[in-house]
Image: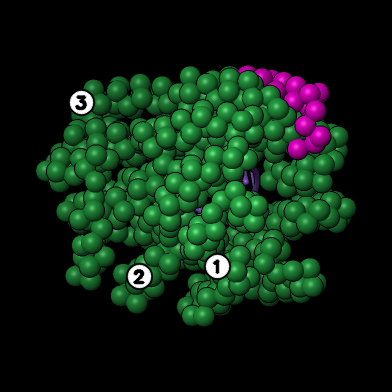
Chain colours: A green, B purple
Amino acid sequence: MAIEMILSKSALKFRANLLTTNYLLKTPFSSSSNVDHFEQHPQSIYQKVANLDDALNLFDQMSQRRPLPSVVKFTQLLQSITKMKHFSHSLYMFNQMCALRVRVNHYTMSIIIKCCCQLYHTNDAFAVLGFCFRRCIVPNVFIFSALLDGLVHEDRILKSEIFFKKLIKQKLCEPNVVMYSTMIKGLCKIGNNVIAIQLLRLMVERGCKPDVVVYSNIIDILCKDKMIDDAFKLFKEMEASKMLQEMLDVGISPNVQTFNILVDAFCKEGKVDEAEDVINIMIEKRLVLDVVSYSSLLNGYCKSLKIDEAMDLFNEMTRKGLKHDVVTYSTMIQGLFQGLCNNHQLEEALSLFHLVGDSKLNSDVVVYNILIDGASKCGKLDIAKTLFENLTNKGLRPNVRTYSVMISGLCRKGLVGDAKELFLKMEDSGCPQNSVTYNVLLQGFLKNKLYDDVEMLLHEMDGRCYSLDATTLSMLLDQIAARSLDNTLLELIGKLVPKELMDGPIFSPK
DNA sequence: GTAGGGTTAG
């Protein structure tokens, strides 16, 4: 079978440490009862567990029932945990489900694949396909979408394109609107907007009707594409309205979210007044503004440093009964930091953070990243350090951005030794460094005149195929000009310069 | 009972 071809390579790479392959493959077909006697919980409880502890307790209870609750209930619980982003716990629970011989199905497998992907183990996710086949679960569009999203998530856009084309050519799966939307997002991620728009045309040709999400995405990328300079701004706006017209032509009315994209686009260009106009049109059209509409405008105010307006809007949302979520809090906190970084604002940001209390809103690593970065940019490294410790104490795992902002903060204070130590700790903590981490540390070394370390790091970057960002590059060239660095390094540096910096925008010739 | 659009690092 053709699909075995897709599996063969990735299956070999399957790492047993994530999902114990042998164990999974040995688990015989289910003997889980079709009759569900676990009815004392209302239906919704599996989908609405409040936190990880509750979910794990519920899972224990369910596991002890005989006969076992249905796979639907197990899967719903699995999904709740996945939505809370406890991906490793989901995988653990999946293993337990298999041990209990729950007859896992398409729903279960698409969740498991998503978990692997979110943990940056997309190769393992592909290997999970082998498990599906052994269980006679023929991958469907949900499973393939999850895999495609995994490749996009890992920035393996070329791979995702190949995979997507393979699915179509070998008739393994006819992509639906969500899958096209994922592929379009991937293409946009690497600035391949032209191809993204071609794909929009292709999906129409193939009889798949783009929906508001696809159009919103296209409008979004047309609006915020930084590759196109100011001269093309007008074109972008025209193109955006053409899209709106097309949407009307195919009978999709712009909804709140479509307007949201326009609000967002205006805000990102610093045109808050125009964004306000759009909001007013929405109000005229009696569209109910949702948390996303406000979120975009909030972001607009913050980016334009109109912090008072942002705070007013933030409070207005509460008055209108809209619930703040992780994104609105993050945006507001970020805004408070983005001001003049004076003590007053740092305090305000921190008090907002504490105001949230003990909810999941202040257990979000993104919020911590913003706070840590903000605090260290305000010169309050001690606060940044405390936040970093708090995060770990809460059982949250710092991600690559957390480490990068911490390393950057340490270097800013000249604590390069500590920065280096943290940098080395990353790999052991299961959070490998990326190109940004390298650039941050490299800048730290340069600023602190540690030229031997600079050279060593450049070689490591070469080995990992990472590239230099514009700031690091110019700092390196300055040091070479000043003869602090040997000009024999130029060849190595040349290898580390990304093509975009040399030639400007690249458009795929395909 | 499944998936895709709004927040973070150089």
Q: Is residue A90 positioned above or below A14 on the image?
A: above
Local crowd size for mark 3, using a 10 Å CA cut-off: few (<14), some (14–19), many (≥20): few
Drawn side of residue A112 relative to residue A324, left or right: left
Circle 3 is placed at which residue position? A66
Amino acid at the residue labelled 2: Leu
The magenta span reads: A338-357
The reply to whether label 1 and label 2 mark residues of one chain is yes
The reply to whether label 3 and label 1 mark residues of one chain is yes
Q: Chain of mark 3?
A: A
Circle 2 is placed at which residue position? A167
The reply to whether label 3 and label 2 mark residues of one chain is yes
Amino acid at the residue labelled 1: Lys
Q: Nearer the viewer, mark 1 or mark 2?
A: 1
Q: Nearer the viewer, mark 3 or mark 1?
A: 1
Q: Residue at x 48, y 42 (%)?
A: A453
x, y percent for residue A496 = 50, 60
